Image (tube, rainbow, N blue to C red):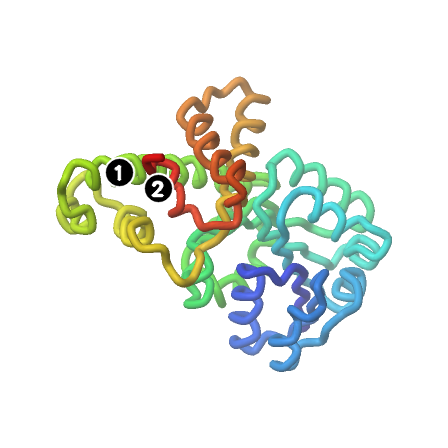
Amino acid sequence: MEVGFVGLGVMGMAIARRLQAGGVSLRVWNRTTGKCSPLQDGGALVCTTPAEVAAGAHLVFMCLLDDAATERVVFSQNGIAATASESTIVVDHSSIGPDATRELAARLAARSGAAWLDAPVSGGTPAAERGGLTVMVGGEPVAFERALPLMKHYARNVNLMGPTGSGQVTKLCNQILVANALASISEALRLAVDGGIEAARLPQALQGGWADSTLLQLFVPRMLEPPAQSLGASSTMLKDLDNVQAFAAARDVPVPLTAITAQLFRILEYQGRGQVEPSELFRVFDRA
């Protein structure tokens, strides 16, 4: 069975390479064709349009930047919808708004009968490369069961959370927890540095206590010593936090801590540093 993959950014490429390493035959497309080369070298067919990808694949995976990019790839003249059919399942690993997901899925179903699984991921590129991603999925159980064996090539924890849009709602909850934790860690680490203790030992000192977490252990070293390999752009986190606030506001749900944290990430964007990884949030607390 040939599988389609559209969107070969850092995360998309890591997922696609895991699929290919698992023996999955791929049809791929990316806006910048040159990014397809590593997969082409491994035997993937490089397509000229998303429509060509979908024409030869019953499952089409996407990993795109935002709502606009997703709509364009699916519904442009040469988009996935042009050749999708009732047997097509679109698995969208993009992190976009739940309401946008539901609208796009309904449009695709009305036009072609294709199923849509919203399946945003968590864990970062390193987790994808070792097959350890967490995937939170929304959609129909039948489509989920068909896609699950493929997702297991790159994910350790995959859960169907409910109907279409449920995966994106779960991802918003994830981002609330991650972003606010990073803000708290940044604040605590600044106090440690200026308070005169050996800040690098903070993860060791707190290990096993209530303040311990995966994020604490991972990000304190990255905050103190900028890493060689980025885990992703801060601008992506800001996009997700903006989606949190819009989705919450539409339902009269207060998210005050997230609103403050979003402004900290917006400072990085304002400073022209939106492409730095989220550990750079610590630098917002630097003295002038």
Visible residue check, residue 157:
yes
Quarter of the rendering containing residue 127: bottom left
Quadrant holding the C terminus: top left
Residue at x 52% of width, y 76% of height:
21
The front one of 4 and 196 is 196
Label 1 sits on residue: 190
Visible residue check, residue 142:
no
* Residue 287 in picture, x, y percent from top left: 32, 35
* Residue 124 in picture, x, y percent from top left: 44, 55
* Residue 43 in picture, x, y percent from top left: 65, 81
Q: Amino acid at mark 2?
A: Phe
Q: Amino acid at mark 1?
A: Arg
In the rendered view, would you say 178 is above or below 204? Answer: above
Instruction: Give me the C-alpha separation between circle 1 and circle 2.
Output: 7 Å
Quarter of the rendering containing residue 190: top left
N-term-proximal mark, 1 vs 2: 1
Residue at x 65% of width, y 69% of height:
35
The front one of 254 and 160 is 254
| 1 sits left or right of 119 in the view | right
Q: Residue furthest right?
A: 77
The front one of 284 and 148 is 284
Residue at x 49% of width, y 37% of height:
172
Mark 1–mark 2 contact, CB under 8 Å? Answer: yes
Label 2 sits on residue: 282
Name the element at disc 1: helix
Q: Residues within 10 Å of mark 1 (few under 14, many from 20)?
A: many
In the image, which disc is placed on residue 207? none
| 113 sits left or right of 286 in the view | right
Quadrant holding the N terminus: bottom right
Name the element at disc 2: helix
In the rendered view, would you say 18 is above or below 198? Answer: below
The front one of 1 and 12 is 12
